[in-house]
Amino acid sequence: MSERIWTAGLVVIGDEILSGRTQDKNVAQIALWLNVQGIRLSEVRVVPDVQERIVEAVNAVRTGYDYCFTTGGIGPTHDDITVDAIAAALGVPVVVHPQARAVLEKHYETRGGLTEARLRMARVPEGADLIVNRMSGAPGIRIGNVLILAGVPSITAGMLDALTGTLEGGRPVVSGTLGCWVAESEIADLLRATEKAHAGVAIGSYPFFREGTTGANFVVRATDQSLVDACIADLTQRLAETGREVVAGGI
Amino acid sequence: MSERIWTAGLVVIGDEILSGRTQDKNVAQIALWLNVQGIRLSEVRVVPDVQERIVEAVNAVRTGYDYCFTTGGIGPTHDDITVDAIAAALGVPVVVHPQARAVLEKHYETRGGLTEARLRMARVPEGADLIVNRMSGAPGIRIGNVLILAGVPSITAGMLDALTGTLEGGRPVVSGTLGCWVAESEIADLLRATEKAHAGVAIGSYPFFREGTTGANFVVRATDQSLVDACIADLTQRLAETGREVVAGGI
């Protein structure tokens, strides 16, 4: 099995995210899905519905990581410019994909027919394949290492489902969590020392305040379950030695 | 009043967002707050807890926009490297800010005293001012056009509250919404024509599916309320002429 770390970047396209009107759900959804594919989400950029800004972000991400995902801007309206922008980024024309056209024709057969606006959703950068979406009909688009997904999270989920297992990736990242009723500032040195003692392991510290008491969860990540288990065991012992209550699995 | 458009970019610093463990809340929170300050959020980058990646993103954003906000990575633990990274980006050393030290000394007086780890939270890039936070004690940091905020959304909110009205900005963006029980693909041309007829106005189209019926909300944005009102009136009339039910204020 390859030890190489596979990486992805995500370009979120949407004025509605930058205006604060819509709470993004796709970053977390795609991140969790990528973990299972053995690919690490390494950067996200949120850009407005402006062609040159999309082109710039897509070119930076597709050349900087193994995969470039995008979400948003593939519907039928005038503000849906993702396909045009990505075709421009890749220097290819936009064409109507025959299979996408057939899917849409069938979908709209009993819904008023395939209008000019609806046909916009069959447009792809030349040379692209479809990400056929068993759940909602609307296909995503794949061209080279660029994967073009919908913005509506439930539709994005259907496209991710269709992509599951089709991308080359490395080892999945595994993790373990433990919680402790402690202010993180009191055990910062302990955490640093524990992480240093376990090569290949990263410890994240996530404090919270509940019912007037401070606590923190510690998430241990590695590509090897035995490394995670050894670090969790060590950290549990070190925290217990300070006299605090440690909660396996997190609080 | 200036007609200039004031812009900001946001760098979200955090492995926990990229791993999918934590759902970001700060993008929407900061976007909405910026709208009220008359500043437009124009780009977001989410980067991992890796110094060179933070430096790169902060330098791109602080030189590309009027303001560069950051969230995350200013706690007391080893994975909190935001201050060091931003000092490196600006080419200045890290120093202990006397006022921040005093605030922390007072805060921890009855909580075990100011340890070395806790003192990390008083470190700032040389030349920085504090964003004094009336709500939780922990200060944010302001240096030049860079504003360094916490990652925990409730603490971020306290820092934004302290910043309210202190940044130079342009006109606030105002918006109006209307809803319609229509598939957006059926009125894509109508929307495009309406936007074109109203200079200075942007129309966003946000479809939804509820109880088996498709509908969409249309958000009209401009920096002038009279432009928004005129566009809403026009769009309402055009949609009503197609025989659909239009819902003022959105569905």
Image (cartoon, coloured by chain):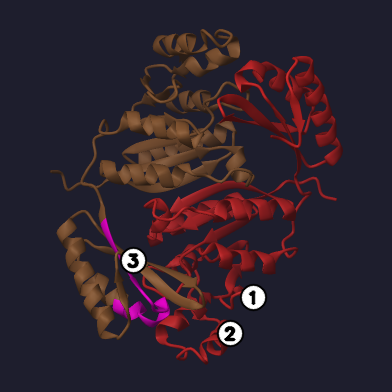
Chain colours: A red, B brown
Visible residue check, residue B145: no
Gap between marks 1 and 2, in whole Å? 9 Å
Taking the magenta stretch, the answer to whether it contains residue A194 is no
Question: From which residue to which does the magenta span run?
Answer: B175-190
Q: Residue at x 57, y 21 (%)?
A: B76
Amino acid type of the residue that numbered disc 1 sits on in the rendered structure:
Val
Q: Residue at x 39, y 11 (%)?
A: B99
Judging by the rendered image, the residue that carries numbered circle 1 is: A132
Residue nearest the observer in this picture, A97 or B81:
B81
Q: Is residue B104 above or below residue A20?
A: above
The chain letter for the residue carrying disc 1 is A
Judging by the rendered image, the residue that carries numbered circle 3 is: B250
Q: Residue at x 52, y 26 (%)?
A: B74
Q: Is residue A177 above or below residue B121?
A: below
Taking the magenta stretch, the answer to whether it contains residue B179 is yes
Q: Is residue A63 left or right of residue B217?
A: right
